[in-house]
Image (cartoon, rainbow, N blue to C red):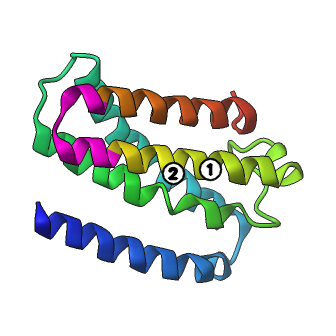
Amino acid sequence: MKLQKIILAATATILTVGAGFAFAQFKKPEDAIKYRQSAFTVMANSFGKIGAVVKGEAPFNKDEVAKNAAVVAIISTLPWQAFGPGTEGGNALPGVWSDNAKFKAASEKMQLAVVDLNKAAQSGDLENIKKAFGAAGASCKACHDDFKKK
């Protein structure tokens, strides 16, 4: 568990430092769209595995839930740099760019919610995981409602 926390902290630091430079790496808008969609796909996969446990559709294995929550927390930091100027399109609605302050606030709320989910998952307490999962899911839904094509 201690090693996992060290790896998570180191990865988060690397991703945070690299995030400021990532936008320059997108040569075409399609590259940014593909990047952010890929990040959301990976995040949704791990989030869905936790959801299956929370709904009672899969057995509770605290180590697996913790691993998936860590993936969600790390990946949640990635897609945002791919929403820069000139990257309109994909599944994103125009409000991402026209009301960027609201979009940024929603993305930050989601990232905080998944950090809480990760903390709950690391504790191994299923009731806390369920509560944190609900809050994280609500933050995802709110952003999708406002900024993602149906």
Question: To which quarter of the image does residue 82 belong?
Answer: bottom right
Residue drawn at point x = 21 percent, y = 48 percent: 122
Residues 83 and 6: in front is 6
Quadrant in the picture for the N terminus: bottom left
Mark 1: amino acid: Ser
Task: Give the magenta range.
Answer: 118-129
| Label 2 sits on residue | 111
- 73 left or right of 139 in image: left
| Amino acid type, mark 2 | Gln
Q: Quadrant of residue 110?
A: top right
Q: Main secondary structure of the magenta part?
A: helix
The local secondary structure at tag 1 comes to: helix
The C terminus - image quarter: top right
The image shows residue 27 at horizontal and vertical percentages of 68, 78
128 to 37, vertically: above or below = above
Q: Which residue is mark 1?
A: 107
Residue in front for this viewpoint, 68 or 30: 68
